[in-house]
Amino acid sequence: MKQVHHSFFTVSALMAAAILMLVLLPASAAGAEQPQYKENEWNYVDGSMDVTNGIPETATGRLARIRSLGKLTVATSPYYPPQEYIDASKTGMDRFVGADMELARLIAERMGVELEIVPMEFTEVLSSVADGTYDLAVSALSFTSGRAAVLEMSKGYYYSGDLASSGLIIREADAGSIRSVDDLAQRDIVAQSGSLQETMAADNIAFYRKFRRLPSAGDVYDAVMEGKADAGVVDIGIARVYIENHPGCGLMIVPDVCFTLQPQYTGDRIAAKKGEIELIYFVNGVIDEALASGQYEAWFAHYAHESAALQ
C-alpha cells in the first residue's frame, strides 16, 4: 500500500511538471495559434496571405486538400472573352485562354500544384463549387448578396472603370426609340442566366413585354443583333470591348442608362465553397500580386486583342 501511494504521488508530480513546461514553452514550440481567417462586414473576404512560399504546411480545409492532392480544380464558363474563352487552335488545358484563365494558372503556380480547368454552362459554375465538386469558380463573377450567402468570394480583381457597371445594349437602329428603361414597357429584354445583370434587370426594370434568360453573354449579344430581343442587360465595360471587336455589328450601349453598384461590391471575383476562407486568403494573395505588377491588366489587353482576331 505504501509503495502504491508513493507511485501515485510520483506520477502526479511528473504530470504537474509537464504541464508547467508546456505553459513556459514559447508559442512556436507549444503549438502556435492559427491565423484568424474571416469575412469582412460586407460578407466577402478581403484578407490576404503571403503566397511567396506556396501553400503553408499548417494549411487546413480545402487548401490543405489541394496541397495533398497536388491539383487545383477550377470551374469556368469559357464563353466570355476576353476573360475566358476557348482557342480552337489549341488542345488540352491550353485551349482555355483569357485573362481569368491566366489568373487561374498563376494561382496554381503559386500553390505549386497542377491545374485542371473544367468547362461548363455558367449556371452550373457556382453550384459545382458550392457543393464542393470543384475548388474554385473563376468565371468573371460579379458580387451579389445571394452569391456571398452561399459562397466565399474573393476581393475584386477586374474593374471595368464604370462604378455602375451594368447597362443596356440595343441595335443602333433603335437609338431614337429606346433611351431609358421606361421605353422597354412593350419590348423584349434578355440577360445572361445567373449573372449580376440578371439581378440588375429584375431590380431596375419594372415593365417589359418579355424577359428571357440566356446561357451566355454571347447569346445576349446575338439575340439583340438578330432582332430576337430589343435590349440586353450587359456589363458596360465588356460590351464596349465586344462592340470595338465587332465593327459593323450594329449594336450600341444606351447612353445615361446604368444600374448602380455600391463601391465595395464592384469588381470580378473568385469563389470557393462557403467556409473555405483560408483558401480565399491564398487566392487574394495571388490577386494582390497580379494587380500590383499590372499583370492582370496586361492579360486583359492582350486577350481583348487576341479574341478579336479569332472572330
Image: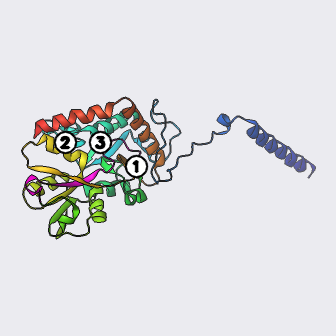
Residue 292 appears in the figure: yes
Residue 163 belongs to magenta span: yes
Position above or below: 236 against 31: below
User: 28 left or right of 176?
Assistant: right
In the foreground, 266 or 127: 266
- Three-letter code, disc 3: Glu
Q: Secondary structure at mark 3?
A: strand
Quadrant in which the C terminus appears: top left
- Three-letter code, disc 1: Pro
**Label whose residue precedes the other's in the sequence (1 or 2):** 2
Q: Which residues are magenta?
A: 153-176
Q: List the residue tagged with mark 1.
A: 263
Residue at the image point whose x is 41% and y is 42% from the top: 66
- Three-letter code, disc 2: Val
Outermost residue to the right: 2
Rendered location of residue 218, percent (x, y): 16, 51
The span from disc 1 to disc 2 (Cα, nearest Å) is 22 Å
Kindly report which numbered mark, 1 or 2, lies closer to the viewer in this rendering.
Answer: 1
Q: Which mark is residue 116?
A: 3
**Label whose residue precedes the other's in the sequence (2 or 3):** 3
Q: List the residue tagged with mark 2.
A: 241
User: 22 left or right of 124?
Assistant: right
The span from disc 2 to disc 3 (Cα, nearest Å) is 28 Å
Residue 112 appears in the figure: no
Local crowd size for mark 3, using a 10 Å CA cut-off: few (<14), some (14–19), many (≥20): some
In the foreground, 177 or 206: 177
Residue at the image point whose x is 33% and y is 58% from the top: 127
Rendered location of residue 24, percent (x, y): 76, 37
